[in-house]
Amino acid sequence: MNDDETSVGLGRPPTTARQAGAKLLWIGIWLAFMSAPVKDLADGNHTPWATALGVLGLLVFVGAYLVLVFRHTSKALDPFRVRASIAFLGAVAVLMSLTLGRPWLVLFVYVSVSVGATLPLRTARWLIPAVTAVLVAIGLTYESPRETITALVFPALLGGFAMTGIRQMIRTTIELRQARATVAQLAANEERLRLARDLHDLLGHSLSLITLKSELAGRMLPDRPELAAAQVADIEQVSRQALVDVRSAVTGYRRPTLPGELAGARTALAAAGVDADIPADVPEGLPEEAEEVLAWGLREAVTNVVRHSGARRCTVTLTPRQTLDGRVLELTVADDGRGGTGTTPGNGLTGLTERLASVDGTLTTRATQPRSGKGFTMVLSVPFESGLGSAE
């Protein structure tokens, strides 16, 4: 989707030219506060030579600021270069303020923001007040210093410390994403170990028995062929049973489960930048066939949300209900995306309807916001008899 090409997730570096442009625009929009020095140059308050140097200094300052904040907000790739860049910005701000006048004091606000955006909190918490103190010291040399303090000191302090919070939030997001990837890898490793244990339990005894009986049959063949034939028959029986066990195990691995699909939906929606509200628990007593159908339905619904809806939020609920036909479990997947594009169901919904029919379930769809037609809601209902005995 086009939104994915231009939007950059929090803590994610831009991967395309359009994403880089979007991030640069987000950073550059705050340069609107540079209107004071620009107006000072445009008003012709200085000699042509001073104006030319002022334009050059402003361009250099803005370029260094944009590069610094663009590259090092989430992580300082080169700490020495970051500190050198901040020192350079501070030197330019001091030089321009002392030579061209009070309108150039706004440069210190950007120095403070750069400190908060790129340096660790333990450094920024004293360097931001230091930058502000230099601003105040230079501002006191001009007329009406109170106006300077009121206009610039608070933006310098608030902007700097606000950026420390944003930087910490971005770093926390990156760490959470890395932790999620680590958990997924650990889960995959655990699944491999479980598969290895199950295969060992299923095949270890059978293969050992087949090997033993094969050796016995080999020793019996010259003199006692009837006993060797009996051993071969036993080998065939054990082999067939092992094959049945392996097929049963593989079928169990392939069958989707509702808890597994809920976890997968949480990961898929988070990776797509969709704010998800997904239950953590599944009601007990759900028949295996019904659970499998709901798992397939959840997978289909989440796939549609990620690929086609353009949604910002998705809500998944599991609700037991008592109806005239008996107790049912409803799985509802609702998003706030663009909604359905037509009245003809696709292959996914058609196949899902057929699966539900096999367990006497139903599928209904509607717009999440009926008046505007926005959003898409899918409701899957399957029979759920758990708890009826206790209720009676």
Image: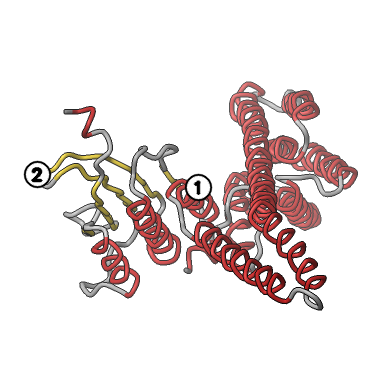
Q: Which quadrant is the C terminus positioned in?
A: top left
Q: Earlier in the sequence, mark 2 or mark 1?
A: 1
- Which element is circle 1 on? helix
In the rendered image, residue 330, in percent from the top left (x then y), is placed at 26, 47
Q: Quadrant of residue 295?
A: bottom left
The residue shown at (85%, 44%) is 88
Residue 314 is at least partly visible in this image: yes
Quick check: 364 above or below 324? below
Q: In this rendering, would 51 be left or right of 295?
A: right
Classify residue 203 by image quadrant.
Answer: bottom right
Q: Residues within 10 Å of mark 1 (few under 14, many from 20)?
A: few
> Residue 187 versus residue 277: which sits nearer the camera?
187
Instruction: List x then y, in percent, for residue 37.
Output: 66, 46
In this view, the mark in front (2 or 1): 2
**Which residue does the numbered mark 2 point to in the structure image?**
324
Q: Residue at x 76, y 42 (%)?
A: 100
Q: Residue at x 26, y 72 (%)?
A: 345
SS label for mark 2: loop
The one of 131 and 227 positioned closer to us in this rendering: 227
User: What's the amino acid at mark 2?
Assistant: Leu
Residue 182, position in %: x, y? Answer: 69, 46
- Residue at 34%, 53% (x, y): give it: 335
Q: Assess whether mark 1 and mark 2 are in contact (beta carbons under 8 angstroms).
A: no
Between 299 and 306, the one nearer to me in the picture: 299
The answer, for residue 44, to whether it is visible in the render is no
**Amino acid under label 1?**
Ala
**Residue 263, which numbered label?**
1
Instruction: Report how far apart the C-alphas of labels 2 and 1 lie in the structure.
Output: 32 Å
Crowding near the residue tagged with mark 2, few <14, some 14–19, many ≥20 C-alpha atoms within 10 Å: few
Residue that lies at the very extreme toward the front in this rendered image: 223
